[in-house]
Amino acid sequence: MAKRFGGKFSPQGASSDQDQPSRGQFDGARVEPAGARANLLFVPAIPLAFLSLNDGAIGMTIGLIAAGLLTAAAFLLREGLRAESAYNAKRTARRPAFPRKIFSSVLTGLGTALAAYRTELLDAETAAQASLLAPVLFGVVATALHSVSFGIDPLKDKGMEGIDTFQQDRVARVVEDAESHLTQMTDAIKRAGDRQIEARVERFQDTARDLFRTVEEDPRDLAGARKYLTVYLQGARDATVKFSDVYARTRDAQALADYSALLDDLEQNFAARTRKMLLDDRSDLTVEIDVLRDRLQREGVRLD
């Protein structure tokens, strides 16, 4: 008699909660801003450099300089896209100090103009007969197309009204150090060779970054959150390094359980600190509103 097949991996099979990704596991997943479209700009410099090797001293020099400019433009574009993504992810942010995308467009135009001028030199009998009009036009068009395709850098600060820039600079330095601790945690946990624990570390990092963003939006919270951004994250990094070394050698289940429990405790503490700072900010707003209402009433302004 036929028997219906069922099980954990069947379409109608029952699945436990452990088999399902936890809610919020993919929340805050970050996409690399510099994708394939930006990385393709590294390609033109490669054939240009090789084709210039047999063009004589002048042609080779111009070709190699053009290839170097195009490569530098691609690097600047990639970093500019990442800086713009970080700028857009924050509610309060300063404009990039160095406009990487704008300089990338300029270098792309210069590299294209030099490559076109190299071609003019090869076609002309003497250097004096080489026209500059076509290379200049190619460079201007390449600069314009690059700017249209990738845009320009943010040129103004966002949400910085009423914020102490000195305090925000202090916050930026502390958050940068905290981000370096998270990066070291990511590098260390890869040695453990366990995808589930890597995902667990990523979830804790998302919770920690929520605290970062809260402090960045109100630098006054730095005093209360400093130990979380320094001492606790340093301890989490050191524990991750030791756990990865032990677990990679022994696959000790108890070590895995202890480390998971540590991440649970850290995540709860970081989340609780973030909630407390948000409640404190709301309390400060309520006090300011009450003070303003009292002042208006004393001045005879009726509030309905």
Image (cartoon, rainbow, N blue to C red):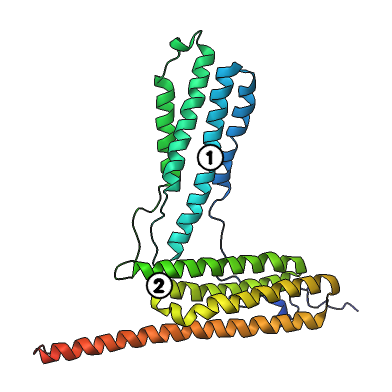
Q: For the residue marked with disc 2, what is the amino acid?
A: Glu
Tag 2's secondary structure? helix
| Above or below for 211 versus 102 | below
Q: Is residue 27 left or right of residue 170?
A: right
Q: Position of residue 18 (x, y in %)?
A: 72, 80
Tag 1's secondary structure? helix
Q: Which mark is residue 218?
A: none
Q: Which mark is residue 217?
A: 2
Q: For the residue marked with disc 1, what is the amino acid?
A: Ala
* Residue at the image point whose x is 78% and y is 71% from the top: 245
Q: Position of residue 57 (x, y in %)?
A: 59, 18
> Can residue 151 be spotted in the picture?
yes
Q: Quadrant of residue 195?
A: bottom right
* Residue at the image point whose x is 78% and y is 81% from the top: 255
Q: Position of residue 177 (x, y in %)?
A: 54, 67
Nearest the eye: 267 or 146: 267
Q: Position of residue 220 (x, y in %)?
A: 39, 78
> Can residue 11 be spotted in the picture?
no
Nearest the eye: 83 or 32: 83
| Above or below for 89 versus 125 | below
Q: Is residue 129 left or right of residue 47?
A: left
* View extreme (top): residue: 125
* Residue at the image point whose x is 46% and y is 66% from the top: 172
Q: Quadrant of residue 248?
A: bottom right
